[in-house]
Amino acid sequence: MRSQSEYGFFYQPKIMSGVAAMENIPVELDGFNARHPFVITSKEISSSGLAKKFVKALYDSNTIIGALYDDVPAYAGIGLIRELAQFLRDRGCDSIIAIGTGSVVDAAKGINIIVSTGKDVLEFEGNNAVLGHLKPFVVVPTATIAPYDLTGCAAIEGKEIISDYLFPDIIAIDTRMIRGCCSDSMRATALVSLTQALEAFLSPQSNHLTDAYASMALRIIAEHIVKAVKRPRNKKTCLAMANAATVSAAAFHNQLPGPVHSLGMALSKLTGHLPGLCMGALLPAALKLRSKKKEPFRSDLLLAVGGADRYAESAENDRANKGEAALMNLISSIPGIPQGLSSLKVPRHTAEEAIALAAKKEPALKKQDLEEIISMAL
Amino acid sequence: MINYNNYPEIKPGKKLLKRIYVATMLFVFGRAFQAVSRVDRSAKEEFAQMPDDFVLDFCVVPNGPHMIVGKDGKGRITYLGWNPAGKKITLAMRIKNIEAAMRMFMFLESSCVATSRDRLIVDGDLPTACNVLHIMDLLEVLLLPKFAAKLGVKRYPKWSQLSPLRKWTSRLLTYVRLIA
Amino acid sequence: MQEIAGTSNKILEVDLATGSFTVGEISEKDRRDYLGGKGLGLKLLYDRLKVGIDPLSEENMIAFMPGVLMGTGAPCSGRFEAITKSPLTGIMVTASCGGPFGMALKTSGWDALIIKGKAKKPSYLYIDSKGAQLRDANKLWGKDTQETQTLLEKEGSGAVAIGPAGENLVRFANLCSGHRFLGRGGMGAVFGSKNLKAVVAKGGEYKIVPVNKKKFEKARKNLNAYINRNSITSGAYRNFGTNANVNLSNAAWILPVRNFTGGSHGEAHKISGETIAEKFNTKYHTCKPCSILCGHKGQFAGKERSVPEYETTGLMGSNLEIFDPVALAELNEICTRMGMDTISTGGTLAWAMEATEKGLFKSNLKFGSTENVAQTLKDIAYMRGIGKELAMGSRWLSKKYGGEDFAMHVKGLELAAYDPRGCIGHGLSYAVANRGACHLSTSLFTLESYFGMASPNAKRGKATMVKFFENVYAAMNSLHICHFTAFAVFLEPPLVKLTPVPMLKLMVQNLTPVALAVMDISLWPELWSGVTGKRLGMLGFKKIGERIHVLERYMNTREGISKKDDTLPVRLLSEPRKCDHTGKVVPLEWMLKRYYKVRKFDKNGIPTDRLLKRLGIEKK
């Protein structure tokens, strides 16, 4: 498969990764003429001391934190987002910093839409409804960062708002913040990154730039995923995985979501399992379906997953097959990866609901494919 | 309803010890700039390439400390103190935060790595900034013992580049001028 | 009339697809290990039900279990239990009811009725001592719960029927027997999905006599004396019904107001039991036989109506900010006739009102307005207009439209009318209760907020308390005896009665395991022992309770339940109430961890193999 030479591509954020990355936030915000950020995070993050580390990182700067709201729950509803937007206005803040992932980042995007446009966030449901620059928006990811969070998508009250203007302006991946807590959450997170990078890589709409990002993300993930799950508190692997998420976000945003992502999200919504686990359970089935349908894998998959040596050793015709084998090998070597949907105890009728949900959300996906993936995974 | 009182404004605190350390280091380096410009051959060459109105402000944003070094009327490099007020800065090299400055001045990161990690903002003539970095590296080589300087510089000069005789002479003279 | 000594141990299994039935026997071991009622019903379904089936498919089964004490004349024993897989929650649901069907089934000679399959056309089931007969329900289809029962009156002495809501598969449709309900979890929809309109039992064919009459009589007398002495059972509930809770809850800030955004309301007294009793000339309207007499009916605007129970008043009254008792009685009547669970209906309506307010959902419902509510209830029952979606319950709605933070349900079952931010132990109980947000699994709010025997805001000891009460109530529901007898059994024995309340509180809060271990609940096992003639002590009773609870939990974990589901709505975990200036929320994570530990579940909330082995539950 050849990637397309005619395309559009967008990726915005300034990314700072590594030691003392958070300390750069004041200077970077200054570049946006913002000195009074509104910080939101969740209770877990603040109670594990990460919020304090963030505040300390801003010492010796001119940045006054308008408020550090650390009560964003795992599900941030529209009511909370509206109240927080009002809070931000009342405090006169000029920028938003989200420390964390998932609902925190979504809430921050929602707040940003309200305070920047003056309209309600629900008015912007759908693709590219937000037009115009928003307030400076910083994301400080924690261990459970998924590519999805770092793109221009926000999921608020189950509705998706997608816009290039929703991208974070600054992403500060700091070694102090990205250490995982346990294998379970790390596994789920890593599987989301893997799925999104892989689907971006194998997508029929891939272009040169998405290829560059997706294959790089895959390389980092292939190198680190097993270690990250085994040793979730290792700084280096966590940093690598966070970077992989950031890199694959670029590829992910510029393509349509693939079947595993869509089904995984739908299943997660219906069953309450973490999205990563659902995607992990579906991923082998989706790959098997691909080979069953005789859709060839790209030869550079081996380069991304197996490394340059194996790529160079293999004959040109063999590379696609070997790449597939290396990928399957990689997936099965992830410790504790769910073995099909039955290990997650997903009944057939729920899986069927998920198919309907995914097909409705992503009309571009073939329903028959989704059904086959599910039946193989069951 | 959100109780606003539970989420007060947070004013940034101070990192006093780190500031004192960085200020001291900057003071030493400032003096050393002046000293090395008079004793070392390669430093002299570097300084000679700089324009005549050269005034460098090497500082940590946003609140300092600063190190101001510039050419005086006679074209000699002089340490001009820590207050940038009233001085016409031609080259500003700003370290983005005190933590980055600490990493540089504790020699955890070389100036080169720091630049690659985006810790410096340069405002002014880029070749001159490169000259300054060269001199910084040289200064570290001269001022510090080898094990420390190795961490701080991009490449520790070989014998062929810097003979021990020249190194020790320059080191001695720089220290004498620094303290005197 | 023939006599049954103790229990008949006969199971009637009916396959609706063919109309045929088989007769089975309850083994001695099962009877001893699971007592009867809820426990035994769960065990029977555990042996029969496949994992992962759709609750509305024909593979689902529903079991009816008349209590062991039923028909013996034990106080408040006129209750039966139904067990099935819930279409609302997707997990096991058990419900208890005081209607006449239980007695009719039991005196037809059956200790269990299991219904499976799906009838080809709308039918109802007739049961007598000879077996079961599937009859055509053409005349009954479309009729409400009361009309249906009236039409079946001649055929048997007790029936259980669905209304239009059940026929239309409203996910929280209930089963009605007399004027009492198998309320929660949508059993009506299971009936509807099986094309089954009603089950009617002839009854009166057998007489039940206890095996050990002496022992039974002694326990019966004691319990009767306790009930007649206790201030709740013989005072508040007897005079004002369960609505006596309104004022108590309002004072303790646990009354749900405006979809659980507030804990008390200035107008709550208008719908309290005391006011209703005074204004509407209430009379008894209870289960039979009963010694507490909590059910009432009254004259509401010239019409005789059941007085809404506290849960109805809380969820459809204060939670929707409706403080008009006449309107409330009217809404209650509609739910009664349509056959819908008032708790889930109230919870869903409150979600709809708030979602409408926030712009997530389009409806003409508004907090504080009775306008359109009655019409919406009928729309739900007939699945018309927005009713079609409201009928799916708040979990489904919030997943579709958003607003999951204020969809007040746990595992899909809507919260009952006690706000756990005012009694956090009860919050834990909601989160871990097997059937969802069930107030009856521990009823810890009584201890925390009504009697002041445990501190409502202390986390310590709550895990142990929840475990204890879950076990005891699971066993109690297997006897089966009315939940309210717990007031008498717990509070009236001399040790509790004579100890001053502050002292009790100190003990319960700080020496929880000891305090709970010395509580005398021997009356319940004695009653069972008297009826069956088998020995059962207090410790054995509690262990059986644990076995039943863990079995139900284990059945649920096979359906995918784990720690991720043992949670509370986001609102209760993160949003303080307006009335509460201290800003309390439920510290669930802390308590949950300890609960799993005392329960001997693993970190993910799954019963360990060792625990199952110890309790003699065979792993499948």
Image (cartoon, coloured by chain):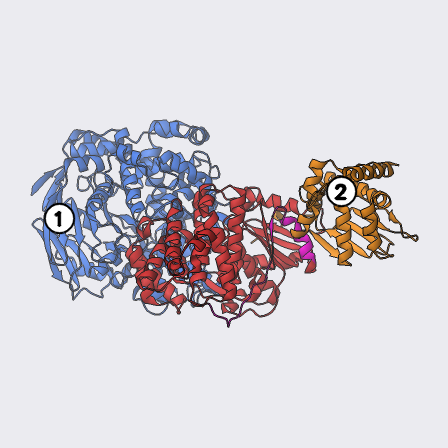
Q: Which mark is residue C419?
A: none
Instruction: Return the x and y of residue A88 as percentages of the image width and height.
Output: 62, 57
Which image quadrant for residue C70?
A: top left
Q: Residues within 10 Å of mark 1 (few under 14, many from 20)?
A: many
Colour of chain A in the image? red
Instruction: Return the x and y of residue C245 as percentages of the image width and height.
Output: 40, 46
The three-letter amino acid code for the residue at tag 2 is Leu
Chain letter, disc 2 residue: B
Instruction: Return the x and y of residue C528 as percentages of the image width and height.
Output: 21, 34
Colour of chain C in the image? blue
Task: State left or right for residue A13 relative to residue C157.
Answer: right
**Measuring 33% from the left and 40% from the top, which residue is drawn there?**
C233
What is the spatial separation of the Cα atoms under label 2 and label 1, in whole angstroms? Answer: 101 Å
Residues shaded magenta: A3-30
Residue behind mark 2: B162
Task: State left or right for residue C282 relative to residue C448.
Answer: left
- Above/below status of C514 relative to A286: above
Circle 2 SS class: loop
Q: Is residue A155 magenta?
A: no
Regarding residue B128, the answer to whether it shows in the image is yes
The three-letter amino acid code for the residue at tag 1 is Leu
Circle 1 SS class: strand
Residue behind mark 1: C12
Pointer 2 and pointer 1 on the same chain: no
Chain drawn in orange: B
Task: State left or right for residue C391 relative to residue A125.
Answer: left
**Measuring 78% from the left and 50% from the top, which residue is drawn there?**
B58
